[in-house]
Amino acid sequence: MEPAGQGQGQGQAQGQGQGCSAPEGQQDAGRPRPREGAQTSHQTPSPRKKPKSPKPENAITIAVSSRALFRMEEEQKIYSEKGVEAYVKYQLDHESEPFLPGAAFAFVKALEAVNTQLRELYPESEELFDIVLMTNNHAQVGVRLINSINHYDLFIERFCMTGGNSPICYLKAYHTDLYLSSDCEKVSEAIEEGIAAATIFNPSKDVMVPENQLRVAFDGDAVLFSDESEQIVKAHGLDMFFEHEKTYENKPLAQGPLKGFLEALGKLQKKFYSKGLRLECPIRTYLVTARSAASSGARALKTLRSWGLETDEALFLAGAPKGPLLEKIRPHIFFDDQMFHVEGAQEMGTVAAHVPYGIAQKQRRMAEKKRAKDIE
């Protein structure tokens, strides 16, 4: 099942521009307290006409697990201590009570805000975000999930509930462009299947994020780009890395797992630009990299240019911590392949997502296996 412990998502404000646990576990680091006045019983919202769902082949599909979208700590505890039957019974007994928002909640709301503006500009277009709830929960838990989605007035019409089985095999059938989960094992499975995916974590403190502008921050190497350059660093050190990047400055890096998602965001941005709304665009992207600008930044920028892509802002930190800068950016989500950067972002109030790709992950898994062997 997917009963589990996700902390409250970030707060929202008007304005523009670590280990695994069963069954879909996430470590909650200093979970923010629920928003003041959060309701604990289901209230049916006033009926409104919902827009038509886009065809999957035309949409940018974001698959989100139930514990990425909502907080389910109490349910996880029951599942772990008493088993699946007690868990399902608890969900049925409490299905009129909506879950509190989880780490991906503000991100999903921002996606829907972009959709609203796209529909106003292009009423007939199906180039929109489409959210799919992807969960290994039992179908009987679906009523509480539906009640929670309706309570928060979310537009999520497509569900995949697999009753204890992994939902990863369904991601391609749902035309998934990005998969967010709190289960690092499922995320790794998705990456191995060639699907952009990340393990999402709650911030240690609550930071307000914009309601009407989607902000997405990406690391470069092993996220947007391949891990080619990181392999040089690990094998030969920084001096050789700088020399390598200078030599191959005009050779584009191979694509990383989230290049396609940045490309999809760029495609939607251009729909606003073509209406003369570049400065008012409700999508803003950021490259936040540990690379040094003078020593290795040119290759990163030239790679994006060769792909016909760009980010609105490019921030080269030369190895400095990313958390303080991300606190100023206030993104809805930040993607990085290094857990220490993810943890640093969490500490400063950013919803961060770990992308398990490249040589850093191989080294981490080898270290974990060695520790396990030492314990034995």
Image (spheres, rainbow, N blue to C red):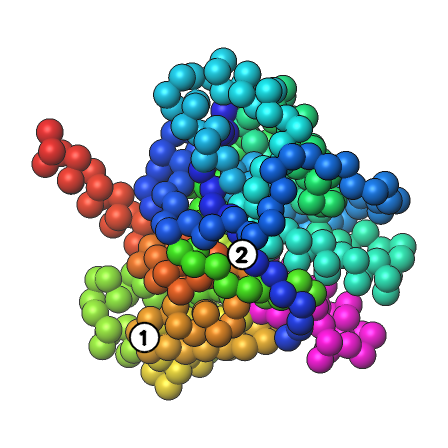
Q: Residue 187 location in percent, x, y?
A: 46, 41
266 is within the stretch colored magenta: yes
> Which amino acid type is marked by label 2?
Gln
- Residue at (22%, 77%) from the top-left corner? 239
Boundaries of the magenta span: 260-285
Q: Secondary structure at mark 2?
A: loop
Question: Residue tagged by mark 1?
Answer: 320
Q: Position of residue 172 (x, y in %)?
A: 61, 37
**Three-letter amino acid code at the position of disc 1:** Ala
Which image quarter: residue 304?
A: bottom right
Residue 292 appears in view: yes
Mark 2 vs mark 1: which is more N-terminal? Answer: 2
| In the rendered image, the vertical position of residue 90 relative to residue 294, given as above or below | above
Q: Residue at x 76, y 49 (%)?
A: 58
Return the x and y of residue 247 as percentages of the image width and height. Answer: 35, 79
Give the number of callouts. 2
Q: Nearer the viewer, mark 2 or mark 1?
A: 2
Q: Residue at x 47, y 50 (%)?
A: 33
Q: Nearer the viewer, residue 272 or 93?
A: 93
Calculate the distance from the C-alpha at mark 2 to the C-alpha at mark 1: 25 Å
Q: Residues within 10 Å of mark 2 (few under 14, many from 20)?
A: many
Q: Is residue 308 visible?
A: no
Q: Residue at x 77, y 77 (%)?
A: 277
Q: Decide: is 45 above or below 359.
A: above
Numbered disc 1: secondary structure: loop
User: 103 and 125: which one is in front?
Assistant: 103
Q: Is residue 371 left or right of residue 78?
A: left
Q: Residue 222 vs residue 94: left or right?
A: left
Residue closest to the far front: 37
Label 1: how many Cα within 10 Å (few below 14, some 14–19, many 20+): few
**Residue 223's quadrant in the figure?**
bottom left
Residue located beneath label 2 in the image: 10
